[in-house]
Image: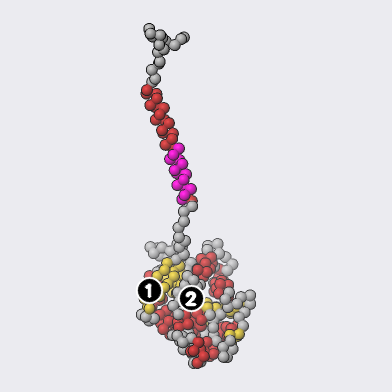
Amino acid sequence: MGIPINLFGKMIRPKINTARKSKAVMLTVFILTLILLAFGAFAAYSQSKNTEKPFVLGKIITMHSSELNEDRILNIYLPDDYDPGDTARYPVIYLLDGGADEDFIHIVGLVQFNSFKWVNRLPKTIVVGIANVDRRRDFTYPTTLPEDKAAYPASGHSDTFIAFLGNELIPFIDKKYKTTAAKTIIGESLGGVLATEIVLKQPSLFTQYIIVSPSLWWDNGSLLRLKPAIPAAPIKVYVGVGKEGVWPAKVPHIMEVDARLLADKLKESENSHVQVFFDYLPQENHATVSHQAVFNAFRLLYPAKESQ
């Protein structure tokens, strides 16, 4: 069949179906739209995989202390399932030297690890890190030695800091969070001196004491000559020390020996309410001992869960 020719000899062009053309254009647009949407979704997904957001370890609270007459920074770690609306309550660890650039981060790591359900050694616990303002002022009691006074002129106000702990901080935490009566204090070096002073003078302020490498040379070891007070209820005390040698004071003190004397003093006290653990870590020194010592302390203070 040939191409139709009109009377003037020109070729007759067939009419195009405009409806079919419109449908084809719409289909093409639809397909292109789907491709663009799919590409956009993939790009958004890829971008979301590469986004950054802060890693939040805890809360930072500023509280004013009337005892200390200053503001203090608290770093707070809450267990991952902490819910103000449920009935669960938690023990509290009070961490001296608890600033973000001090011991807060690595101690929180130990607490989280030991409370994992597949470890199940430590109960899920709130950690309160007390950031320092002046640890020499806060952690030492008055010294009788002129050389100590000259070297540390702001020292000797531990009584005020202990009042801050007992009268302000602990009630503040108990009111703000869901806590139990179980309270642990962790102190290392001069912080260990403060924890030692508390356990000897006001042992019922905490239920557990983790004392690491205490600087008992302070005031020529006068704390070691103090008669321990008797706690109203059972307490546990861990004393850990590394291979640290002689503190070069006017009267030299060997830190391992002083730590052992403290543990023996607590064990020999006429009080069945005090359970003491002594731990010598010869592979560690004064700079490295705290992390391993606290790990060991958790293992010794919670023996019932060690085999689980």
Q: For label 2, count other residues whose C-alpha is less than 10 Å away and answer few (under 14), some (14-19) or many (20+).
A: many
Q: Residue 47 colored magenta?
A: yes
Q: Residue at x 45, y 40 (%)?
A: 38
Task: Kindly indicate whether the residue at mark 2 contacts the one at mark 1 (C-beta within 8 angstroms).
Answer: no
SS at circle 2: loop
Which one is nearer the viewer's eye here, 242 or 31?
31
Report which residue position mark 1 lands on.
63
Residue at x 53% of width, y 62% of height? 117
Q: With respect to residue 54, does 149 lie above or below?
A: below
- The dot on residue 234 is none
Dot 1 falls on a residue whose secondary structure is: strand
| Numbered label tally | 2
Task: Report the quarter where the C terminus lies.
Answer: bottom right
User: Looking at the image, what colour scheme do you see?
Assistant: secondary structure
- x then y, percent, for residue 90: 45, 69
Residue 73 visible at all: yes
Nearest to N terminus: mark 1 or mark 2:
1
When asked about the image quadrant of residue 277, the answer is bottom right
Measured as percent of width and height from the top left, residue 289 is found at 58, 75
Q: Which residues are magenta?
A: 35-48
For the residue pair 137 and 173, the one nearer the viewer reads as: 137
Identity of the residue drawn at 42% across and 10% down: 4
Distance from Cα at disc 1 to Cα at disc 2 = 16 Å
Residue beneath disc 2: 97
Q: Left or right: where does residue 28 sit relative to residue 302?
A: left
**Quadrant of residue 304 in the image?**
bottom right
Q: Position of residue 256 (x, y in %)?
A: 60, 82
Q: What kind of secondary structure does the magenta stretch mostly adopt?
A: helix
